Image: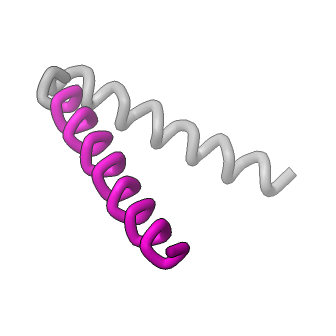
Amino acid sequence: MSENNKENKSKADDVHVSDGLAELFEVSEQLTDEEIQKAAEEAKQAVEDAKNQQHH
């Protein structure tokens, strides 16, 4: 009986992840190129900041 529960949980997790990806895709569709560029620049800056902190 517990094997069946594990299988059901796995399927439920897959559906949950799939829903999350669909939602993420919808949100990304709404972003303008400018917003995407800004987010990319912020991510790049965060990486640079993290690198600089490691060297101190």
Q: Left of 2 or right of it: where is 31? A: left
What secondary structure do most residues of the magenta stretch adopt? Answer: helix
The question of residue 25 being in magenta is answered with yes
Decide which of 27, 32 is in the foreground and name it: 27
Which residue is farthest front?
1
Q: Is residue 15 above or below residue 6?
A: above
Q: Left of 55 or right of it: where is 13? A: left
Query: x, y percentage for residue 40?
Result: 35, 37
Query: x, y percentage for residue 16?
Result: 35, 46
Residue at image location 38% in from the left, 63% down from the top = 8
Q: Left of 29 or right of it: where is 27? A: right
Query: x, y percentage for residue 4?
Result: 43, 73
Q: Is residue 5 above or below residue 49?
A: below
Residue at image location 68% in from the left, 47% down from the top = 50
Decide which of 25, 40 is in the foreground and name it: 25
Residue at image location 59% in from the left, 46% down from the top = 48
Task: Name the quadrant containing residue 2.
Answer: bottom right
Q: How many numbered marks are there? A: 0
Q: Give the color scheme: rainbow, by chain, secondary structure or one colour.
A: one colour
Task: Name the quadrant containing residue 10.
Answer: bottom left
What residue range appears in magenta?
Answer: 1-28
Decide which of 8, 16 is in the foreground and name it: 8
The question of residue 26 being in magenta is answered with yes
Query: x, y percentage for residue 1?
Result: 50, 75
